[in-house]
Each structure stands twice: as C-alpha cells, then as structure tokens.
Image (tube, rainbow, N blue to C red):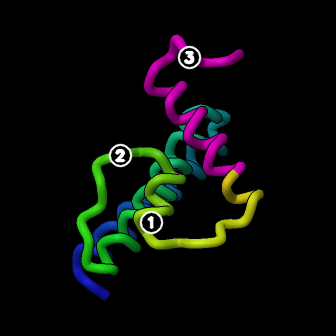
C-alpha cells in the first residue's frame, strides 16, 4: 500500500471514531458529517492507490466514479446521496431541513 493511501485511511479511521463519539454524545449532525468525511477519505485513498490524485470535491458519488467503483448497489447510492445532502446542510445551514 502506498504511503499516501495509508495516510488517507488513517484519517478516515479517525473520522469514524469521531463519528462514534459524536453519536454517543447525541450530536447527530456532527456524527453524520464525520461519517461523510470518513467515506470521502476512504474513497480518496482508493483513488490514490490507483495512482491518481483525487479531486478536491466532497460528492461521494463523483468520488466513487473517480475510484473506478462500478455497479454500486442502489442502497449504497441512496446512502451516499443522503450523506451528500446532510453534509451540505451542515456546511450551509440555510439548507438544513428540520
């Protein structure tokens, strides 16, 4: 495994731990944001391992495409789409649904 890939995976694991702490503390928006971050960094690690430089974007579905992951299951696509929506809402509160 490439060193840069390993770095992406380490920070993804850190974000996942932060998501758990946020969940345990009933900070659910922060939990979802950290889950999004963990998936994003995992995908960027996959892209890096393929010898490419990942785009500086946050859209999980676009990163999945960059990571050359084909045939993503519909439930995963739906989850990634929802994570994208909530992540955007945490960054731009005027888009937050109650």
Tell me how far mark 3 sits from mark 2, CA to CA.
Answer: 19 Å
Q: Nearest the camera: 75 or 17?
A: 75
Residue visible at 76% across and 57% down?
75
Badge 3 marks a residue whose secondary structure is: helix
- Name the residue that disc number 3 marks: 95
Position of 16 relative to 25 (above/below): below
Residue 2, quarter of picture = bottom left
What secondary structure is the magenta-colored segment mainly? helix
- Name the residue that disc number 2 marks: 57
Q: Which residues are magenta?
A: 78-98
- First reached walking from the N terminus: tag 2 or tag 1: 1
Label 2 environment density (alpha carbons within 10 Å; few <14, some 14–19, many ≥20): few
Residue visible at 33% across and 80% down?
50
- Name the residue that disc number 1 marks: 42
List x then y, in percent, for residue 23.
64, 43
Q: Is residue 74 left or right of residue 41?
A: right
Q: Is residue 38 left or right of residue 76?
A: left
């Amino acid at each position: 495994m490439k060193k840069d890939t390993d770095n992406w995976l380490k920070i993804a694991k850190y974000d996942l731990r932060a998501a758990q702490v946020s969940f345990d503390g009933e900070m659910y928006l922060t939990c979802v944001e950290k889950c999004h971050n963990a998936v994003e960094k995992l995908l960027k690690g996959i892209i890096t391992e393929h010898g490419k430089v990942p785009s500086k974007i946050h859209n999980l579905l676009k990163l999945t495409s960059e990571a050359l992951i084909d045939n993503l299951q519909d439930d995963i696509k739906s989850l990634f789409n929802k994570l994208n929506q909530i992540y955007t809402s945490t960054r731009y509160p005027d888009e937050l649904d109650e």
